[in-house]
Structures are given as C-alpha cells and as structure tokens.
Amino acid sequence: MAYARKRDAVDESALAKRAQEGDEAAFETLVERFSVPIMDYCRRMVGNETMAEDLAQETFVKFYLAINQYDPAKPLSPYLYRIAHNHCLDWLRKKKVDTIPLAWEDAETEAVYEIEVPDSKLAPDELVARAEVNRAIEEGLESLPPIYRSALIMRYREGMAYEEIAAALDLPLGTVKAQIHRGREKLQQKLSAFV
Amino acid sequence: MPNECELTPRRIDAALDGELSAEDQRAFDRHTSVCGDCRRSYELARRAVATLEALPRPAAGAAFAAAVMLRAREARAAQTRRRRLLGWLLSAGTATTGAALVGAWKVVLAPALAPATALVAQCGLALGIHGRTLLKTGSDMLGTCGKVLGALGTAAGSAGWEVAKSAAAPYGLALALMGALYFIWRTRSHAAVHHA
C-alpha cells in the first residue's frame, strides 16, 4: 500500500485550518505527517539524500510562510507536492548550471543503497539481487525527464489519484496518464535485464 | 477490431490500477495464459511498480519537524523584518520626496514663475473689468437692434396683413409670414440679449 493512502485527508484540512489561525502545534503535526513522503519525493527527484532533506525542509518553510494562500476545502497533499515539485525543479535547473561532479553523486547514491536495503529474512545473494533490481529502477527513474518522474512517484509511491497528480503538476488528466504510462514502460525496459 | 495483443497495454494500465472489469480481467487472463510476450509485459510492469513502491523511504524523525519549525520561525521573523524595513523605506521615501517637492517649489519654481503668475493675474483683472464694459455695451446695442427690428417686423406684419386683406393674397401672405418670422426672431434675440 502506498504511503499516502494511510493518511486522513479530512483531518489534514482541519489541521491546516488551525495552522492558518496561528496554531503552530497543528502545523508541526502536518510537518510530521508529510515529512517522510515529501522528503522521499525530493530524494527521488534530485537523487541526493542530504539535499533532499534540505529541499523538504524548505518546502515546509514555504508552505508556512504562504499558509493563508492554501484553501483548506481542497486536499492538502497536491498542494504540498506542488510546492515540493517546483522547488525541486528550481534546484535541478540550478544544478544543471552549476554542473556538480557526477562521481560525488554516484558515491552518495551507492552509500544510500548499502544502508537502505537491509532485510534479515533474505539470503545474501537475494539481498544483492534485490539491491540490483532496486538500483535499476532508481536509475531508470533518475533517467526520466523530471515531469515523468514526478508523476510516477506521486502515483506509485504516494498512491495519489490521477486527478490529484494533475492538480499538483498543473497538467491535464490525459497528459498525466500518458506520462505515467510512458514512464512505467521506461522502468520496465530497465528491469527487463533482470528478468 | 484490435486483436488481444493490441489491447494489452491499456489492460495492463487498468490492471495495475485495479480497474479492470470482471469481463476484461477474464479476457486478459485468458490471453496472457497463451501469449508469452503479453504475459512478460504484464509481469515486468507489475514488478516495476512493486519495486518502485517498495524502494526504501528516508527516515524523518522529530528532529526533522523541529528543524522545520526553527527555520520557519526564522523565515517568518526575517519576512516581518523585511516588510517593516520596506514600510519604513517607503515612508521615508515618501516624506523625502514630499519635502524635496515643497523645497523645489519654494526655492526654484515659485520665484521663477512669480512674474508669469503676476502677469496672468493682471490679465485676468483687465479682462474682468473691460469684459464687463464690453458685454454691457454689446448687450445695449443688441437690445436697441432688437427693438428696431421688432418694430419693423410688427409694421411689416400689419402692412402685409392689410395687403393680403385687400387682395394681393400671395404677396400679402408671404409678407405676413416674413413678418411673423421677424417677430419670432425679434423675440428670441431680445430674450437672448436680456439673458446675456
């Protein structure tokens, strides 16, 4: 089950409303609820865990500063993802200009895999095989254009409805469905080497 | 009509979303049981999605929320300071500009324009005095002319009427008409003169 499906949208709107009235505890609760998915989204978008944490924090700070612009009658999730998405795109554009060395990024990505894959029930060779598959999928994801990546992450990691993704990315519903379809086919191609 | 293989991509999307109807599901299962390519496509799609869903998630504890709150409060304080500074700068700018404008008027513009202002005032006064005299004279003249024309009109009207009465109907009528027109014009011009 995707992470976002566990959350309660009605409760989130009520918390956001309280946060708009100046209740900082309500805002903090929202941060706690969305910290993992937003950080995960940023991590998948920029491929760098340290930077992802920073981008996720800045996403919440932006939300905090402009909280009165949010309409509590609408679901919070697409609104937050929209801020995160735009923030990640800004960072990716800037990174393109700054040209960060790839070796640094690869080294960090490698470290992340070593830490994140533990599963004591699996044999060592199965662990290695799973890590390779995960890596193929992550590489496939990172090789996609950012907009495809966003749609896939929102759909399959956050379990968002197509309509919510369309709202978050400000795209027509048909475009979102097509992007998810094409993005998934790209991932299948990456995975085909392991099957 | 598309064959079963052509339907597979759409059915895979629907199957992954859990939106295949029972009938389509049966058709899909039937087809993938006999078509190796479509079965492989579906397996790859399912596995790609499952792997994507299961990729490890980052850990974000209470420290993350605390860091966000700290940064958010700092950002709000900085935003307030920026707004206050902007407001102060706007007020100071407005006051400075106002003082500069008043100073420029008093020191530069008012002395430079003083002769022109006096000339305009004198012209206005002269126009006021002479204009009044001119208007009175004009009004008197127009009044006199109106009276003369009125008398002439009345005389012509009476004469015309008499002529018409005595026989020269067409000419008499025309004269009477002219007389009437004269009378109207006289009345109007008289009224205009008085109004002025």
Image (cartoon, coloured by chain):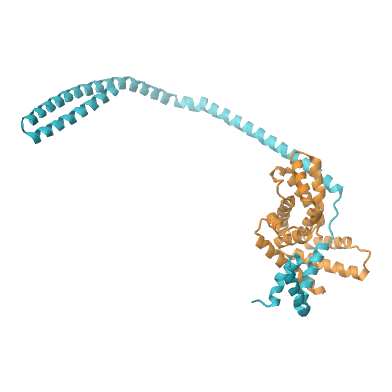
Chain colours: A orange, B cyan
Q: Where is residue A59 in the image (x, y as percent from the top left)?
A: 75, 49
Residue at x 76%, y 77% (from the top left corner): B30
Q: Which residue lies furthest to the front in this view?
A: B23
Q: Where is residue B174 in the image (x, y as percent from the top left)?
A: 12, 34
- Give the left or right position of residue A104, taking residue B143 as reference: right
From what the image shows, is residue A40 above or below residue B166? below
Q: Nearer the viewer, residue A175 or B69?
A: A175
Which quarter of the figure has residue B48? bottom right
Disc count in the image?
Answer: 0
- Give the left or right position of residue A73, taking residue B191 as reference: right
Image quarter in which the C terminus of chain A is found: bottom right
Q: Where is residue B77 in the image (x, y as percent from the top left)?
A: 75, 38
Which quarter of the figure has residue B180? top left
Q: Where is residue A129 in the image (x, y as percent from the top left)?
A: 87, 70
| Residue A51 visible in the displayed image | no
Residue at x 73%, y 71% (from the top left corner): B23
Which quarter of the figure has residue A171? bottom right
- Give the left or right position of residue A91, taking residue B60 as reference: left
| Residue A20 visible in the displayed image | yes
From what the image shows, is residue B155 above or below residue B67? above
Image quarter in which the N terminus of chain A is found: bottom right
Residue at x 71%, y 59% (from the top left corner): A162
